[in-house]
Image (spheres, rainbow, N blue to C red):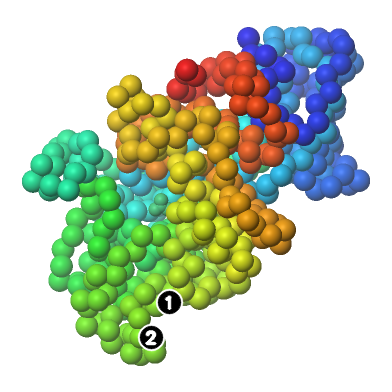
Amino acid sequence: MPDPLALVPLPQSVVWSEGVWETSDPWEGLSVGLNEDLPPTEYTLSISPAGAALSAGSEAALADGRNTFAQIVTGTHGAIPCVTISDAPRYAWRGMHLDVSRHFLPAAEIETLIDAMALHRLNVLHLHLTDDQGWRIEIKGYPRLTEIGGRREQTLIGHMGDDEEAWTFDGTPHGGSYTQEELAGLIEYARRRGIMVVPEIDLPGHLQAAVAAYPELGNFPDQRVGVREVWGISDHVLGVSDEVFDFLRDVLTQVADLFPAPYVHIGGDECPRVEWERSPAARARMNEWGYTRVSEIQGHFTQFAADVLAEKGKRIIAWDEVLESHLPDDTVIMNWRHGNGIAESTSRGFRTIIANNEHTYFDHYQATPAEEPLAIGGHTTVKDVYTAKLTPKKLGEDQEKLLIGVQGQLWTEYMPDAAQVQYMAFPRMCALAERAWGSPEQSWEEFEERLRAHLPRLDAFGIRYRPLD
Ligand code: ACM
């Protein structure tokens, strides 16, 4: 039975008291109400022998309180300890990223992840819907995106060494996509659990699957490329024709209409410029736009996407590479490359989400590689996630205020199915949740003890995880 004292994440203030509340249906016995006297981020939960009451300053805080309640009651079998909790999160954005391009994950499996996120009071699911290896979202008027772009013929086996001759493939097609209707269902499922789904349409690179579906979107329309079957970074990025920008407008407009979140993530990471350098059309466009550097083409895409989304009342989020060009003031930067990026983005006044690849990339090995399933590389233990410094040493107070969140990343090159996604996510996600929530700091040993007692809750939810050492 899970130990109700082992809350992960730990609320800001928890006072346990004598006695238990005996109930066969705690959810039935929970009274819930908004309280306008509380700040919008705050909830209070009290459990006494007579029953349980939850009040909060907003619907979002109510969801947080419900999720804490779920932690307490999971597995308690009718005898719930009495407690008073008052609580508010440190970060507004407590995210998990999930790449459904490299490996497609059925919507039901995403729902399971959403349930687990809610249990940990994480509140943003960042869905990476498109990439070189697969386009996963239905866009009306562009059926080939999912028919052609949503399927690759085969997938690289093992690591992608430099010697192409040595690459071997599984010979098995891999594909899948979500209709807009299915995504709407997922968005609603998440909303009911206090989680906002933020879509990512990565551009102008990481789009080979779209170019495979519609060659006219590329830089050399006579060149045929397939959906990418290996990992790494593709040189086949978007071209610069009017057709490309019409396409982007259609895609971003449909995405903005489908996802109620006020943000759309437009990627912007790892966009090679070799095709633009070789392309006479790109050169001509640079002259027309008055650019002298090829890198400015990416800035043009960023601004275009921001303008289209602004018409829909949405702001852009992008990976930190976009700092290389001029940006709209309300851009949110997702910092993944190195801590200096956080210093730069916040010194330039951009709100920033901490997603650094040293400590928040859950595609890295979580123990000695020889003892673990194949992963992309790296080595990030659950202890690292709990204890590592996530921000640069010297940030001014104004800069600290611009840090709006923390997020874990699940890139799925080496996660072919839900079981592997869960194994890589947990228990690291539990440690991340504490940091995102801003739980009172404890030693690793104290956290580990609580985590050990928390793991049966994951069992109760049917979640696979890497056992603690
Ligand atoms: C990234 O890992 N390319 C954002």
Q: Which amino acid does label 1 sit on?
A: His
Is 307 rendered above or below residue 16? below
Residue sitting at x 65%, y 53%: 404
Question: Outermost residue toward the left?
Answer: 165
Nearer the N terminus, badge 2 or badge 1? 2
Marks 2 and 1 sit apart, C-alpha to C-alpha, by 10 Å
Residue 35: x and y in percent read 88, 42
Q: Which label sits on residue 291?
A: 2
Let me know if residue 176 appears in the view: no
The reply to whether the residue tagged 2 has its Cβ within 8 angstroms of ligand 1 is no
Q: Nearer the viewer, residue 334 or 187?
A: 334
Residue 96: x and y in percent read 53, 42
Q: Quadrant of residue 287?
A: bottom left
Q: Which label sits on residue 37?
A: none
Q: Nearer the viewer, residue 258 or 300?
A: 300
Residue at the spot of label 1: 300
Q: Nearer the viewer, residue 70 or 83?
A: 83
- Circle 1: is it few (<14), some (14-19), or many (20+) Cα within 10 Å? some
The reply to whether the residue tagged 1 has its Cβ within 8 angstroms of ligand 1 is no
Circles 2 and 1, Cβ within 8 Å, touching? The answer is: yes
